[in-house]
Image (cartoon, rainbow, N blue to C red):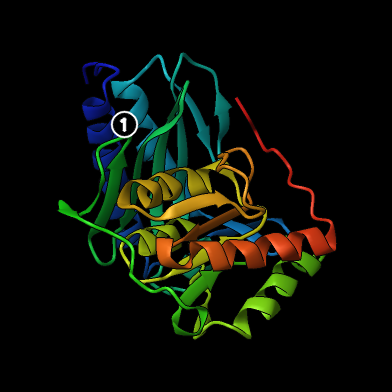
Amino acid sequence: MSAAPDTLDAMLETAEEGARRSGQILRERLGRQRTIEYKGGIDLVTDADKASEKELLAFILGRHPAHAVLAEESGVTQGGSYRWLVDPLDGTTNYAHRLPIFSVSVAVEGPEGVVVGVVYDPMRDELFRAAKGRGAFLNGEPIRPSAVSAMDQALLCTGFPADVRENPAAPLGLFTRIIQQAQGVRRLGSAALDLAYVASGRFDGFFEFRLKPWDIGAGALICQEAGAVATRIDGAPFDVAVGDILAVTPGLAKELAAQCAAFVQQIGWTPVRRLAR
């Protein structure tokens, strides 16, 4: 495999093809017997996570050998100006239970932030992608967020971090506050897919605490390039190293951001930077 140039086109091509290759492994293994290990509490990893990541990293580093990687299962490797944020299976608990709601998430972070993002759903063969300044797409067609502008008409989504049993106040408290105002709040179990659904208008907003860079790097860029608003949950500018995120359609952004900001101020929430460059 020959090395690829450090251009947006080349990195986007690598991210797309790598995600598809990993997704094929996940799809083929879904119905097989699982080998499951627990990383602590309710957080787990399967043999499929590892096989998917092995294929994905081999493909990425084969084309971009000088780049760094930050991957969920294998950690950090050092490199040059670009770093790949890789989640080979976002939605592992779903996958372990053979629930077909999961994705592969691949992002590229450069000196100016995340510049490429791909989220691939192998069960529906849906590939969401974005490159900085070029818009967002689903299977090659442009996407945009919904036109919803009232909380009581909004279908929102959230998730709960792996340590929710030990630290329930923030995620359960905000969920309780929002569920009383929205039309509905769902929890699908794949943050990358949730963000892609906000970008494409299937959800009107998404909020979650304590995510990792590989969970949100690709999805946040796809949201921003589609025209949605993606910030930290306290309303500060989005930072991939701070895992508290709010992504929302523009018509609902002011109201939902105000609700989230008021809640985190009330409980004295302090964001934590994770694995910054």
User: In this view of the protein, which residue sits in the foreground, 131 or 82?
Assistant: 131
Q: Circle 1: is it few (<14), some (14-19), or many (20+) Cα within 10 Å?
A: many
- Where does the image place residue 151, in percent across and percent down from the top left? 51, 78
For the point 67% across and 38% down, the residue is 274
**In the displayed structure, would residue 165 be above or below residue 136?**
below
Front-most of 145 and 258?
A: 258
> Does residue 245 sit above or below 123 in this rendering?
above
| Residue located beneath label 1 in the image | 59
Q: Nearer the viewer, residue 185 or 189?
A: 185
Q: Which quadrant is the C terminus positioned in? A: top right
Q: Residue at left 25%, top 67%? A: 124
Q: Is residue 208 visible?
A: yes
Q: Position of residue 212 (x, y in %)?
A: 60, 46
Count of numbered circles in the view? 1
| Residue at the left extreme of this rendering | 140
Q: Secondary structure at mark 1?
A: helix
Q: Give the quarter of the figure containing the N terminus.
A: top left
Q: Position of residue 195 (x, y in %)?
A: 43, 58
In this rendering, would 131 be left or right of 48? left
Amino acid marked by disc 1: Phe
| Picture coordinates of residue 272, whole percent (x, y) | 74, 43
- Write the residue at 30% across / 62% down: 200
Q: Is residue 249 visible?
A: no
